[in-house]
Image (cartoon, rainbow, N blue to C red):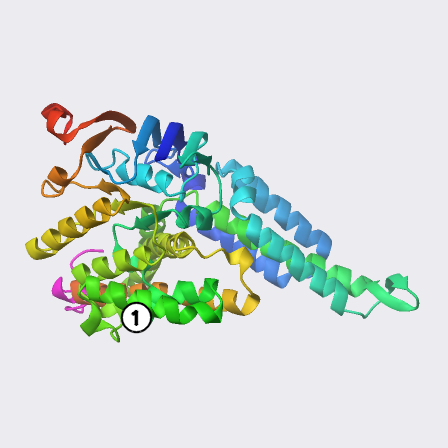
Amino acid sequence: MKRLLRDARTKMALVTLLTTGAVVIAQLGALALILLLSLVAAGAYGASLPRMLRRWRAILWLLGVVALFQIAFLRTGRALLTLAGVMLVSSDGLRVAGQVSVRYLIIMAAALIMSTSSARDVTQALTRLRLPTTFVFMVIVTVQFIPRFAQLFRDSLAAMQLRGLDFRRISLIKRARAYLYLIFPVIAAALIAAQDLAIAMETRGFGAYKKRSAR
Amino acid sequence: MALKLSKVCYRYPESAPQQSRAGDLATPSPFTLRCDSLEIEPATMVCVTGANGSGKSTLSRLLCGILTPQAGAVLIDGDDLTGAPLAAFGRRVGYVFQEPAHQLFATTVIEELTCIGQLTTARREHPCLQQRAEALLRRFNLSDLRERSPQRLSHGEQQRLALAAVLMQEPRYLVLDEPSSGLDAASVEFLCQLLNELCQQGAGCCVITHDPRLRPLCGREVTTVAGEVCCSTPTAACPDKARP
């Protein structure tokens, strides 16, 4: 039973269920319950919630900003806060902000559940689910390349700052230009890596025969 | 006056627990680097050697502020810059990554040298930047490639361009992570000559290397063994057993 619960396929089923619920259900109370279940499941699988909060601090800030926008610009429903006759907070704005935030938090908790399985376990589970080999391979490649590109982005950012660029001391326009410069090496590296990988796969006979020698 | 690490300890953050084949969750123990004291004085060259995974790159990243130590201090010319923004380090320390492509962003070679300066300085200073860039292109034999994309250069040319771009800032100290990896004999000779010149002009250089051709240039050799910076001796006197 313990092994079944720890199987990556069980986690995939659970994550599918939780995220589908998050998208389909609109009631805030039910969404909050799904979020609670997701966090309990992530905790039970050994994921560290404090670490998650630290690592996803920037995303949580962004979520907060999105929620504030929803509250500020959705003016339908009952007025909850008015100032000099202008509706500042409406019941609909508050509800939608809550829904969007909780949905994103559920998706993040689902990602946290999957992060407790290694990339190898996930790909093996996908193969056992009899998904097409090409699809499984795409997942493997994506999973392996994400940390590489993240490191490349961090290195490029550090290199730029070490050349004297202080993002806090330049104008917004210059900051946007600097970020455009940052994207360039990542795209170039992705294209080069994809090209190299395609050549390496072809030289090793990937897809050369209709029938695969191993599954 | 020196780039100095004092009683520094850096421990990588714990990675997420991973499930073993038996189904148990295990957290891999994080790598820790300890350095009691390391000084790189102006006009000297120090080489850092050590086996793969012993902490050489971590040491270099601590020296230039990419990593912030949990304990101890990073001092540059007496100023404690521990935890300071990278731009503050960048004004005094230049860092050349092991993979030069990671620090090349622009669409042409000449733009690579001027782009950061154009973002950080006023328009009236741009002609001066251009002149300095042209001089560096000539010094690094890159003049013929000025309009080429940095991503389409050979590894050796990228390495030279990365170093030239770092020198645009005129840093007092230089940290180079395996600068000779993937270079042919002529390129290594050029690199040695250049490092010598920089050293004579007063720059303090720290070279992370496995390459025996770079060792004779360095006055001192520092060895890292399993996260401990354990040997700091003049190159000639460094015991062979401490070397990888």
Residue A206: image quadrant is bottom left
The quarter of the image holding the N terminus of chain A is top left
Q: Chain of mark 1?
A: B
Q: Is residue A156 visible?
A: yes
The quarter of the image holding the C terminus of chain A is bottom left
> How many numbered callouts?
1
Residue ranking furthest to the left: B185
Q: Is residue A211 magenta?
A: yes
Q: Which residues are magenta?
A: A201-215
List the residue tagged with mark 1.
B110
Residue at 72% over, 56% down: A28
Residue ranking furthest to the right: A84
Where's residue A162, x and y in %? Answer: 40, 52
Q: Secondary structure at mark 1?
A: helix
- Mark 1 belongs to which amino acid? Ile
Residue at 27% over, 72% down: B149
Q: Nearer the viewer, residue B213 or A202?
A: B213
